[in-house]
Image (spheres, rainbow, N blue to C red):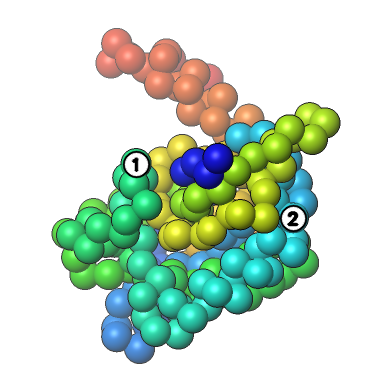
Amino acid sequence: MKSLLIETLPFNVSPITLTEGKSTSGNPLVEGILATVEVKNGNGRYYSKELWERELEKYNVLVKERRACGELDHPDSQVINLKNLSHNISKMWWDGDNVMGSIELLPTPSGNILKALIGAGIKVGVSSRGMGSLKQVGEVLEVQDDFDLLAFDFVSTPSNPGSWMYPVGQINEALSSPINPYSKVNSILTEILCSNGNCPIF
């Protein structure tokens, strides 16, 4: 039986360079990894490359028609709700096993919230939304051939480490930079230690 399948990927952006990349409409652009195939993701799911190739071929029709829109936060629905639109996928391409994308941030209420978050350097995630069934294969839940990609939404919780979003023109530099595996731990410890208003020096 088909169910709603949601995958979240973290996107990281710089607070100072949103103006460097603009769409033909003059809206800010960010780019990064939309999905990674043939790996076990944070939800324990596995997508074959053939499955994503098929779905991206269909989804690219929406991209060309400027209808590849998504929402800010995941709805529990198959419907793309126009009043909650925040962005539009303007381009997609393959880079090895990564599905790359360029995303236009729209001047809508939700899009303006997203732009404010990104402009402040907040890390946000992009998440695929689709309908499909799963089959347990060893240690993974394999997404079956009945999968239909519906949209990519921006969310706060990532499931695919290393998939970050960057302002246009910075992605190659960012992807080659070393990742600090302890940054999240350090952030949590700082928040705890500084919760009473006095931060120790360390």
Q: Give the residue displayed 73% in from the left and 33% down from the top.
A: 136
The answer to whether residue 192 is left or right of residue 107 is right
* Residue occupying the far top of the picture: 196
Question: Residue 92: which quarter of the image?
Answer: bottom right
Q: Give the residue displayed 29% in from the left and 85% down from the top.
A: 25
Indicate the amino acid at tag 1.
Asp
Q: How many marks?
A: 2
* Residue that mark 1 sits on: 76
Indicate the amino acid at tag 2.
Ser
> Where residue 192 sits in the image (x, y, percent)?
41, 14
Residue 135, compared with residue 84, is above or below; it is above
The residue nearer to you, when weighing 33 against 186, is 33
Q: Give the residue displayed 74% in from the left and 64% down from the top.
A: 50
Quadrant in the picture for the N terminus: top right
Q: Give the residue displayed 59% in from the left and 60% down from the top.
A: 33
Instruction: Tell me the crowding category of disc 2: few under 14, some 14 to 19, or many 20 or more residues within 10 angstroms, Cα based.
Output: some
> Where residue 139 sits in the image (x, y, percent)?
79, 30
* Residue occupying the far right of the picture: 138
SS under mark 2: loop
* Residue that mark 2 sits on: 48
> Where residue 109 sits in the image (x, y, percent)?
17, 59
Residue 180, compared with residue 62, is above or below; it is above
* Residue occupying the far bottom of the picture: 24
Instruction: Tell me the crowding category of disc 1: few under 14, some 14 to 19, or many 20 or more residues within 10 angstroms, Cα based.
Output: few
